[in-house]
Amino acid sequence: MNAADDKTIVKDYFNSTGFDRWKRIYGDGEVNKVQLDIRNGHQQTVDKVINLLSSDATLPDISVCDAGCGVGSLSIPLAEMGAKVFASDISEAMVGEGKERALKLFGNNDNPTFAVQDLEGLTGKYHTVVCLDVLIHYPQDKAAEMISHLCSLSESRIILSFAPKTCALSLLKKIGSFFPGASKATRAYLHKEKDIVKFLQENGFTVGRNEMTKTRFYFSRLLEATRK
Ligand code: SAM
């Protein structure tokens, strides 16, 4: 399968069965045990990013690009805390849900601003670029290009999370829970931490904080890197 096919499959998935599934996981309604575990794990990652950003910077002073924002799980609380957030995702359905959630909360859609856009099409400059749990959709050769592009958008800091390759066996065993039923066609790519660190360094960034979040069904390593 080539990268273009991968991207179309991912986009279609997050506009259909994947949308229904992840909207529920990233919501607060009733879900099954596996989904609840993933929801809790993902929330830990989001909380870590919020703590990290708010401990280092005055949020109203910074702009944040949330690349592959999903339904706005990070963008919305960051905007609520005053950061200027640009949120984008390849899936129109995910972006639509994010917009609705933001509208309910803030009564307008000025911040975050949402756009349907794939990562490669992003332009502009932001104090911080964040990309959470999106690398699972990128094979290694595409991951290098993708990280390089995100680095080019960042003036100061980049924050990435990904499913680490060391957990490969346990993750692969559970992959049916990540992508059940028909959506199993969606491939999941794990990445070696040392590769991601290397890609960041090659683009002029130094890795600072590094944290693992692990629940039964959710594995995600979070790396923060700043410009040298
Ligand atoms: N980052 C969000 C979060 O942590 O709440 C969403 C994570 S979700 C597992 C992965 C998201 O990545 C989906 O919303 C999907 O549509 C998006 N995505 C996948 N490939 C993408 C691409 N090439 N460009 C933009 N978004 C992409």
Image (spheres, rainbow, N blue to C red):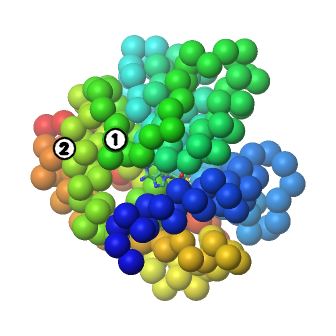
Q: Quadrant of residue 193?
A: bottom left
Above/below status of 61 relative to 137: above
Which residue does the numbered mark 1 point to in the structure image?
Answer: 121
Q: Residue furthest right?
A: 30
Front position in the image: 133 or 99: 99
Q: Can you tell which mark lies on residue 189?
A: none
Quadrant location, the C terminus: top left
Amino acid, disc 1? Gly
Residue 194 visible in this rendered orientation of the protein: no
Contact check, label 2 and label 1, Cβ < 8 Å = no
Question: Image height check: is 78 above or below 216?
Answer: above
| SS at mark 1 in the image | helix
- Vertical side of 77 occupied by 194: above or below: below
- Percent across and percent down for residue 161 are 43, 54
At 28% from the left and 26% from the top, the residue drawn is: 125
Specify whether 2 is left or right of 82. left
Badge 1 residue CB within 8 Å of ligand 1: no
Mark 1 residue crowding within 10 angstroms, few (<14) / some (14–19) / many (20+): few
Circle 2 packing at 10 Å, graded few (<14), some (14-19), many (20+), is many
Asked if the residue at label 2 sits under 8 Å from ligand 1, the reply is: no
The picture places residue 196, in percent across and down from the top left corner, at 27, 60
Residue sitting at 72 percent across and 15 percent down? Answer: 107
Q: Which residue is painted at 16% across and 51% down in the image?
A: 201
Residue assigned mark 2? 205
